[in-house]
Amino acid sequence: MPRPRKPASPFRYYNSSPEIIRLVVMMYVRFPLSLRNVEDLLAERGIDICHETVRHWWNRFGPMFAADVRRQRVSRMKGFRQWKWHLDEMYVKINGAMHYLWRAVGQEGEILESYVTKTRDKKAALRFMKKALKRHGSPEQITIDGLRSYEAAMKGLGNIEKQEVGRWANNRVENSHLPFRRRARAMLRFRQMKSLQKFVSIHANVRNHFNLERPLIDRQTYKTRRSTALAEWQLLMA
């Protein structure tokens, strides 16, 4: 019986080490840096790469790393059935046209789903909620704002009894927009819906991986969690 073949390494056609590629992708996606900022910071460490290499690497490896992180976290989080979700949408301009970024955030600040649409009607809300429910299961409660599209979509899904609407109840998801806003300003703009959807998915998973709840824990615990997160990052796609 022939031995099963090992999956080919995604780094096999690159001269740079996987450690450097992982570092570049983490720096660009996690922090509000431009491509040339990443190039300059790496030059100080003795790593000579072009800013176009940074662009190529995050486009090539970012989705792979994000999928690996999401696969591990979703499998662990499906065991928690008492979830409370927060849903909200934010405005993003693409070539001067307004688009909408829908977000589902868990009760601990975990970004569960991100979805980009041209409209924010019932049809768009329904697609977004079906996508989130398929991947993460059904929560006990869903907190929304006053947008009627959510209510109409939840009636269509038959879970209208789970909704909660409150003036300050949705601050959890409102605050989750801030890191993406800071990151988007460094990128200046998006030109296509496809590129925006790609980046928000990568950014959400990288942020979830390094979201260490720093204000809620002591310094020693934070250092331990940070070291663990960095060590796990270096093992992605190994």
Image: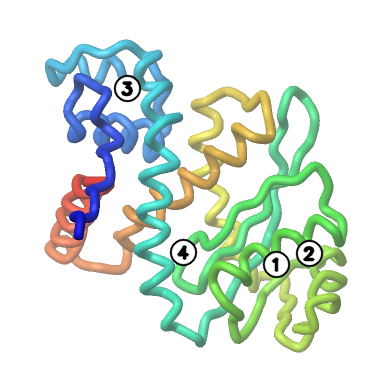
Q: Nearer the viewer, residue 218 or 122?
A: 122
Say if mark 4 contacts mark 3, CB within 8 Å. Answer: no
Which residue position holds label 2? Answer: 126
Q: What residue sits 41% from the left and 38% below the top?
A: 62
Look at mark 3 in the image and give the residue it sits on.
38
Image location (x, y in percent) of residue 38: 32, 22
Q: Amino acid at mark 2?
A: Leu
Residue occupying image coordinates x 68% and y 60%: 88
Q: Residue at x 87, y 71 (%)?
A: 152
Find numbered disc 4 in the image and state the secondary structure of the residue it sits on: loop
* Residue that label 1 marks: 130
**Circle nearer the N terminus (3, 2):** 3
The CA span between labels 4 and 1 is: 18 Å
Q: Is residue 216 above or below residue 29?
A: below
Q: Residue furthest front?
A: 1
The answer to whether residue 226 shows anywhere in this view is no
Q: Nearer the viewer, residue 32 or 207?
A: 207
Q: Is residue 205 left or right of residue 200?
A: left
Q: Quadrant of residue 163?
A: bottom right
Residues at marks 3 and 2, CA–CA distance in whole angstroms: 39 Å
Horizontally, residue 41 falls left or right of residue 53, namely: left
Check residue 221 in the rendering and tell me which mark sits there, or answer none.
Answer: none
The answer to whether one can see residue 131 in this image is yes
Amino acid bearing label 1:
Lys
Residues at marks 1 and 3 touching, judged by CB atoms closer than 8 Å: no
